[in-house]
Each structure stands twice: as C-alpha cells, then as structure tokens.
Amino acid sequence: MDAKVENNVLKIALDGRIDSNNAGETEKELLEIWEANTADSCVIDVDNLEYISSAGLRVLMKLRKKSKKPLDVVNASNEVYDIFQVTGFTELLNVKKKLREVSVEGCEMIGSGGYGKVYRIDPETIVKLYNPGISAEFVEGERAQAQKTFLLGVPTAISYDVVRCGECYGLVFEMLNADTVAHIISSDSAKVSEYAGRMAELIKELHKIEVEEGELPDRREKVKEWVNSLKGFLTDEEIDKILFYLSSIPKRQTFLHGDFHTKNVMEQNGELVLIDVGDAAVGHPIFDIAQMYLCYGFLADAVRQGRQPKELIGFPVELAEPMWRGQIKAYFGLSDEEEIDKKIAMIFPLACLLAAYHGLSIRGEISDDMKRAILDGLLCKQGIPAMEKASEVIW
C-alpha cells in the first residue's frame, strides 16, 4: 500500500483484496503507517481495491478507533461500495463512490454562469460542469441543495450523479429535449415577451413557498454580515446607513432562488425547470427581484446610455430591457409605464448593494484598490444616495 501526507491529511491507497488471509498483516501495516505520520485526518483510497471482506472492514474500524480522527473512504467501485453498504459500514464511515468520468468534447454548450458551463452530453442528459478549482465537496453540496429544494416543492431538476471531467467536477441531470430559456430567446427574439411573463410567473410561484426556520440561510442576515465586514473600506456612517436600509426590509421565511435568470431555467415538455439552486435562501422577495436587476436591469441601463456592455445573459443585450421590464410588469401586475419606472427605482438601491456583494464575493481575493473601486462606484456614488432619497418602500 502507498501512503503520503498532503495538507495535513494522511492518504493511504489500498489495492487487491483484503480478507481473512491478509487482514492481520494489513492491520499491522496500517497502524504502523498511522503512528509514523502526524495528520489531522486520514483518507483511505480504495480505487484499486477489488474486494474487502468483513475482516477487512473491521481493520478499518480499528484504524478509526486507534487514530481517533475522521476517516474517509474514497473512490469505492460499485462492487466495493455495495459491501460497505450491505454491512452497514456506510453508517459508520464516510464512504464515497468513485466518480464516473464523462467527456464534453464535441458536446453542445447550452448555458454558462459564474460557476461553470452546462453541456448536453446526449439527447436525455445534461451536465453542469463546474470551473476548475471548485471542489467535489462544493458540488456535492449543490446536489444536496437541489434535493432539499425539490422536497420543498420547487420545480428543480434532480441530479442523480456527481461526475468528473478531467480536473473538473460536474452534476448530471436527466433533461430530455430540454433547452435553456436564454437559448430559446437567443434563437427567436420574438419570444422575449412571452418568456418574460412566464419567468415572472415562475418566480411568483416560488415566492409562495414558506420554509421552516433554519432550513436555508437568511439572505438579509448574510448581507448584513458582509456589510459589517467592510469597516476600513466604508465609513462607519456609510455602514450605518446601509444597515438601517437593510433593517427596513421585513424578515420573511419566503423561499428565495438567489440567482434567477434565463440561463438557470430550462423548458422541458412545456414546463420551466430550475437547474441551479445553489444560492437558495429565505427572505423578502425583494432580494430575488433586485437580483434580477443585476442580470437584466443594469444591462438595459447601459444600452440606453449608449454603452456597449458585455453579453452575459445568453441572448443579445438589446433584449435585456424588454425582458427586465416585462418581468416587472408581470410580477407586480402593472401596465402603466410610469408605474413600472417607479417600481424599478425602488428596487435600484438593493440592486446596487447586491451587485457589490456578488462582485466582491465571486472575485474572491482582490486588491484593496479594486475593492474600494467597486464599493465607491456601486454604493457610495449610487446605492447609498438612492437609499437616502427613497421616499417610498417597495415592502
């Protein structure tokens, strides 16, 4: 067996067969390896393990008890995993199956976003392939989130497999003859009004779902924590103004999608289905509406001002305005253009705040100068004055 320590984790690779004939020898070697190395946890890689008997399983339990540290078993084949499961050891050890390898070479890319791209790998199946560097644990968390939201009644596609593609991880969904709303609109711009209305109706239905406290994170409280972390980049007075604004938004247990746009929604057999619920939370619906402003409203503003923004929505930027205004019109049941303008003005301050929040969160480690530029541009020059000038509140 091979062993090495990486990032304070002892990794031991087992191979061949472990049964009553060699269990004692295997136990002795495993314990010697553990005692010769210092690590916070141990990972047993069974990629090349063909068979393990109950005697072999007891060896792993002895190692776990001896080390008194977390013990993971990874890369189990279907046959080896079945042995762990039938004997009940999946309840005692963290056992993970070997991930299936897939290829997207020559496959149609039908969507993209901040975390990765979506490919159709066959007529019945799509894969959401995450960017390099995003861990398998993160992807597994997204899969678990999708299952949780499905049980809440959210029309989301259920992923049945976590896979690998080179150095990237992905989620596989069964989506027969499905297409993203972004691609549908890109193929036929005349459908933008129809799908603006349908998207609005879908998010209205999501906002009828009430979630038990503690099931999902609270979006308002999360943003408040972030604002409090900006000391040194914003003045105390500016921070207080933003927190006062956020505190005016009532606490709700309403389901929030958190990243609702046409690249995250697919149409299958006439039904709109979500394929990304990793940012699901609870809170006032205004957070989802303001998030939609980020996707379409700011682009529409840029086009109206004669600028040439980068196309990020999956269809031509000149369609951002009819999509955005169409969604506001349908969601709030408005027909008068002035009333739509007033509603959008009310949403604008929170949209600025969320733009800064996501801009800094997605970028990760950035320079202080870049952070100041983002905060100054989105909040100090636009967002905070808009919060102060608001004479009405949407909620």
Image (spheres, grey):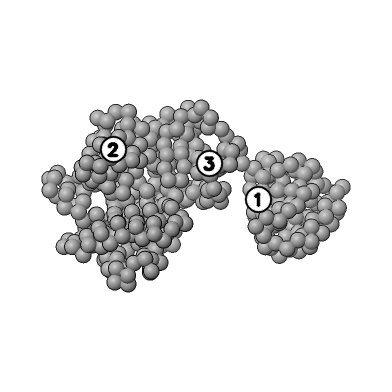
Q: Mark yes or no: residue 44 visible.
A: yes
Question: CA gap, disc 1 to disc 2?
Answer: 47 Å
Circle 3 is placed at which residue position?
Answer: 170
In the displayed structure image, the side of residue 24 where residue 185 appears, left or right: left
- Marks 1/3 in contact by CB < 8 Å: the verdict is no
- Secondary structure state at the residue bearing disc 2: helix
Question: CA gap, disc 1 to disc 3?
Answer: 19 Å
Comes first in the chain, label 1 or label 3? 1
At x 74%, y 57%, the residue is: 61
Q: Position of residue 4 (x, y in %)?
A: 73, 53
Q: Position of residue 211 (x, y in %)?
A: 39, 57
Comes first in the chain, label 3 or label 2? 3
Determine whether 203 is above or below 65 in the image.
Answer: above
Q: Position of residue 194 (x, y in %)?
A: 25, 35
The three-letter code of the residue at mark 3 reads Gly
Circle 1 is placed at which residue position?
Answer: 95
At x 50%, y 40%, the residue is: 129
- Secondary structure state at the residue bearing disc 1: strand
Label total for image: 3
- Tell me which corner region of the image, top left, top right, bottom left or bottom right, holds residue 218: bottom left
Comes first in the chain, label 1 or label 2? 1
The three-letter code of the residue at mark 2 reads Val
Circle 2 is placed at which residue position?
Answer: 317
In the displayed structure image, the side of residue 255 where residue 307 appears, left or right: left
